[in-house]
Structure formats: C-alpha cells, structure tokens
C-alpha cells in the first residue's frame, strides 16, 4: 500500500509556461473555431456544435503538433465515438452501464484505428445524455468536426512557422 501511495506523489516537475504570445494565439484560435461553428449553426438553424469541440480546440490550437490534434484524429475520433455511442444506445437502451460500454468501445476503437482524440471520448456520454437519432452522426458530429479542422488548417498555418497538420 505504501508503494501505491508513493506513486500518487508524482515525481516530475511542472512544465514551463508557454510564452504569452502562444497562449494568446491559442485562445484566439479556439475563439475563431467555436465562433465559426456556432455562428454557422445559428445562421443555418442547424446543430453543428458539441461540448467536446471546446476540448478539441484546446488540443488543436494549444498543441497542434501532437498526434491527438491531427485532422484524422479529430474527425475520425469524433465520428467513431459518436457512432459507438449511438450504436450502444440503440442496442442496449439508455442504461448507465451501456454508456460505460460505449465509452470503453470508443476508446478501444480509436486506439485500434490510430485516431485517438481524447475529447471525442465524451461523445458517447453526450449521446446518452441527449438520446439523439442517427442524424447526430452527420450533424453535429461530422459537419462540426470538419468545420473545426478547416479553421485549424487555415489558422495554424497563418499564425506562425509551424506546419499543420503533421500528417493526415
């Protein structure tokens, strides 16, 4: 038990704070992406926004170089996780344990298909809370994720010397 408790103390050091410019540019990117998605949703009277997209913005604009932030991970991770949630809801009904199964299957699916996007792990939970129909897979999931990635492609390549995406 002592060995286990000692692991909880950690052992590393806090990473350095990013430069103020990087912080501001990341925040601006998140603002622009959500503004585009939410603004289009309102203008078109169409559901395009998921709560998990806010967390996607943290990765895509704050850490665009990491694998979790790449377009294939964002789009396929969201679509796969929403599909998994919808399938489990249809197969098992709106039970607490079915939501847990859906999250577990979404994690496993994203890992197996090499499209892990941690914010997408919340999509099955969103599905179980909202109990939408299969159209949820197209709007807001696919359309919203594609819009978010489109903004990220433009913004991340205009803001500095880095390259986004690192891969497709």
Image: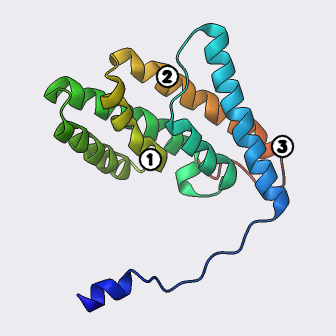
Q: Position of residue 66 (x, y in %)?
A: 59, 58
Q: CA distance from mark 3 to mark 1?
A: 25 Å
Between discs 2 and 1, the one toward the N terminus:
1
Which residue is the site of mark 3?
158
Which residue is the site of mark 2?
140
Q: Nearer the viewer, mark 3 or mark 2?
A: 2
Left or right, 79 with respect to 26, comes to left
- In the rendered image, is residue 117 in sight? no
Which residue is the site of mark 1?
115
Q: Position of residue 113 (x, y in %)?
A: 37, 47
Q: Secondary structure at mark 1?
A: loop
Between discs 3 and 2, the one toward the N terminus:
2
Residue at the (39%, 15%) spot, across then down: 135
Q: Position of residue 40 (x, y in %)?
A: 66, 17
Residue at the (84%, 52%) spot, across then down: 160
Residue at the (37%, 84%) spot, across then down: 7
Residue at the (31%, 22%) spot, across then down: 131
Within-10-Å neighbours for mark 2: few <14, some 14–19, many 20+: many
Given residues 3 and 26, the one toward you in this image is: 3
Within-10-Å neighbours for mark 1: few <14, some 14–19, many 20+: many
Q: Quadrant of the N terminus?
A: bottom left
In which quarter of the view is residue 9 placed? Answer: bottom left
Q: Secondary structure at mark 3?
A: helix
Between discs 3 and 1, the one toward the N terminus:
1
Q: Secondary structure at mark 2?
A: helix
């Amino acid at each position: 038990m002592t060995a286990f408790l000692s692991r909880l103390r950690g052992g590393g050091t806090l990473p350095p704070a990013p430069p103020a410019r990087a912080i501001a540019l990341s925040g601006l990117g998140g603002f622009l992406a959500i503004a585009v998605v939410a603004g289009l949703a309102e203008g078109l009277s169409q559901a395009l926004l998921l709560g998990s997209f806010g967390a996607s913005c943290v990765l895509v604009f704050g850490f665009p170089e990491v694998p979790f932030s790449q377009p294939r991970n964002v789009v396929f991770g969201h679509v796969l996780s929403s599909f998994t949630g919808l399938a489990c809801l249809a197969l098992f009904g709106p039970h607490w344990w079915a939501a847990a199964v859906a999250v577990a299957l979404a994690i496993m699916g994203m890992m197996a298909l090499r499209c892990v996007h941690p914010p997408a792990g919340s999509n099955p939970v969103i599905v179980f809370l909202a109990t939408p129909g299969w159209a949820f897979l197209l709007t807001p999931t696919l359309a919203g994720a594609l819009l978010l990635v489109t903004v990220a492609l433009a913004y991340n390549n205009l803001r500095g010397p880095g390259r986004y995406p690192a891969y497709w």
